[in-house]
Amino acid sequence: MTDETLSNLLHEERRFPPDAAFAEAALAQPGLYEQATADRLAFWEEQARALTWASPWTQTLDWSDAPFAKWFVGGTLNVAYNCVDRHVEAGNGERVAIHFEGEPGDTRSITYAQLQREVSKAANALTQLGVEAGDRVAIYLPMIPEAVISMLACARIGAAHSVVFGGFSAEALRSRIDDADAKVVITSDGGYRRGNPSALKPAVDAAVVQTPSVKKVLVVQRTKQDVEWDDERDVWWHDVVDSAPDVHEPQAFDAENPLFILYTSGTTGKPKGILHTSGGYLTQTAYTHRNVFDLRPEKDVYWCTADIGWVTGHSYIVYGPLANGATQVIYEGTPDTPHKGRFWEIIQKYRVTQLYTAPTAIRTFMKWGDEIPAEYDLSSLRVLGSVGEPINPEAWVWYRKHIGGDRTPIVDTWWQTETGAIMISPLPGVTTAKPGSAQVPLPGIAVDVVNDSAEPVPNGSGGYLVLTEPWPSMLRGIWGDPERFKETYWSRFEGLYFAGDGAKKDDDGDIWLLGRVDDVMNVSGHRLSTTEIESALVSHPKVAEAAVVGASDETTGQAVCAFVILRGDAGYDESQAESVVTELRNHVAREIGPIAKPRQIMVVAELPKTRSGKIMRRLLQDVAENRTVGDVTTLADSTVMDLIKKGLGAPS
Ligand code: 6R9
């Protein structure tokens, strides 16, 4: 990456030093970095000791069969015991584990003592249904407490779960059940979505016709809608779980016992079943959750808005928070049901202290307008988190100002399904925040940015993000495909894990994520990042959201094409289209340089996003290059592309 193009983001000069009182009281102190650097493995051993082990490990890390890692070799523990029972035994049984807020407004608060009974019942019921340690169970549920209970019940009996996001199709579900050879599927009649019950069981019915491994389907009743029923195969949760004994003796399993498989979406080809195991995964999710969010389990109310169908839901709704004995909110629905202030209403109601959400949500809230959150009391918030995509500096600053009351630290957390837990993030109370940058590897984590020859780039330059040392919550492989694991992550740079992301180091050595490397454009031999130009566009007061792609161009190789959504209050009407576009093109030229000036800017009403909120630039590239739009099956809303094409006057 040439120096003159490493521009816009590095010009972000706003700095947010930690508040002195917060810094003094913070859980994470600067000494944590020194401690981890002095002896990395001893540092991780200390973090592992925050868990309760049934028998101690004999070796911290076995890397002799790299890239297949074993952490805490010989140690045994029960993950569900760590997430539930031990808090009850410590006298915290009456503490609320989950404040559940259903979309229609129904609520349930579940204490740790109740959770222990619920998980025990579910574990007994799964055993009765024939599930044994080492088996796989598919979970296809809405965001209801039974989703968490099911995951913990699997962990309790040593079976691996494979959660499939409830928005995925019958075909996506079928291929995942098949790949993992799941014995049981746990689902529900449906869930609530945008004010209406939305069915789930029909997809399971269609999928399991073709999956001989599935012996039983366990069905939670949530919406009470009609369902088809197979008397041989289907059982109601309220029949078999509610009547099961509420005491269950947790058995200890090996630290490397598979905990779950989670399939990653997005790229072409067969989905990859990312495998995570027990001891190292739980160690790192608990450690990061505590330190990155400054968690005080005795008084905080934490809320992560992800769905448990994604890794963020696994690590930062289920395992990290519960291992730490946190009280958290779980919300079933969408942020605009029944009104656009629903999130803020929930924060006000439960006095939420930590909010963990995604840039795409933050940009949506910006688009809806500042006045909506302003109507609610958000003063309980102490730490705000962001995950999933690079956060544009403007969105970061908006988040801090309008949600965080110009007061809260923001943690921009970089990690992946594969890393299992947060890897790069500021520490609240320690790091002086730079809007738009994830900044520094957490204590215990080793990352670098390298060039094509695997050499570390100097400060002020860009390249590829790599992880240079194994970490406890690292993926242990791709389910059933060890070769693909080596090939995908370990073959590009010898001995280094290649994350697939571009990044640059600023003059202080802080890391700025630039999006997937396939999102890097090459315009007239200059490497430009989509994130960089998107951030420039979003920094314009009229723009709410932007997506940038490189479209092939006869002269420049690639040309910058931008799709923008204007802010609701921008007062835009069609007759001004031309002048707005000119204004935005000039704005980008001013912010980054003429080289980054988009060849084309298209004003659209929506952007195509995956169900986890990541913009699918590949589809926009099809539009920009006048091609038939490719596979839209992983889109959250498959009609978006028709809307975009119609809006641009292109044939659909
Ligand atoms: C946790 C999660 C992983 C990819 C990752 C990167 C992008 C996630 C980010 C970020 C910049 C952040 N990503 N967090 N990019 N800043 N704070 O999202 O996992 O769904 O597997 O996606 O998401 O490109 O490689 P996953």
Image: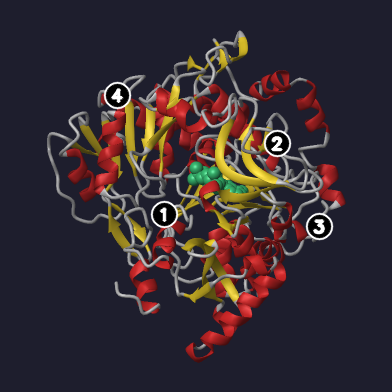
**Up-down: is 267 above or below 395?**
above
* Residue 459 in sight: yes
Residue at x 55% of width, y 63% of height: 556
**Residue 646: quarter of image:** bottom left
Q: Nearer the viewer, residue 519 or 222?
A: 519
Looking at the image, is mark 2 or mark 4 nearer the viewer? 2
Residue 1 place in picture, x, y as percent: 66, 49
Which element type, helix, strand or loop, lies under badge 3? loop
Going from the N terminus, do you reach mark 1 or mark 2 first? 2
Residue at x 54% of width, y 79% of height: 568
Q: Which residue is mark 2?
A: 442
Which element type, helix, strand or loop, lies under badge 1? loop
Looking at the image, is mark 4 or mark 1 nearer the viewer? 1
Q: Amino acid at mark 3?
A: Arg
Question: Alpha carbon of mark 4 to alpha carbon of mark 1: how far?
Answer: 30 Å
Q: Which residue is mark 1?
A: 611
Q: Which residue is mark 3?
A: 15
Going from the N terminus, do you reach mark 3 or mark 4 first? 3
**Residue 74: quarter of image:** top right
Q: Amino acid at mark 4?
A: Val
Whether tag 2 and tag 4 are in contact, CB under 8 A, the answer is no
Which element type, helix, strand or loop, lies under badge 2? loop
Whether tag 1 and tag 3 are in contact, CB under 8 A, the answer is no
Which element type, helix, strand or loop, lies under badge 4? loop
Residue 627 place in picture, x, y as percent: 35, 64
Going from the N terminus, do you reach mark 3 or mark 2 first? 3
Question: Which numbered marker is on residue 131?
Answer: 4
Q: Amino acid at mark 2?
A: Leu
Going from the N terminus, do you reach mark 2 or mark 4 first? 4
Looking at the image, is mark 3 or mark 4 nearer the viewer? 3
- Identity of the residue furthest to the bottom in this view: 575
Going from the N terminus, do you reach mark 1 or mark 3 first? 3
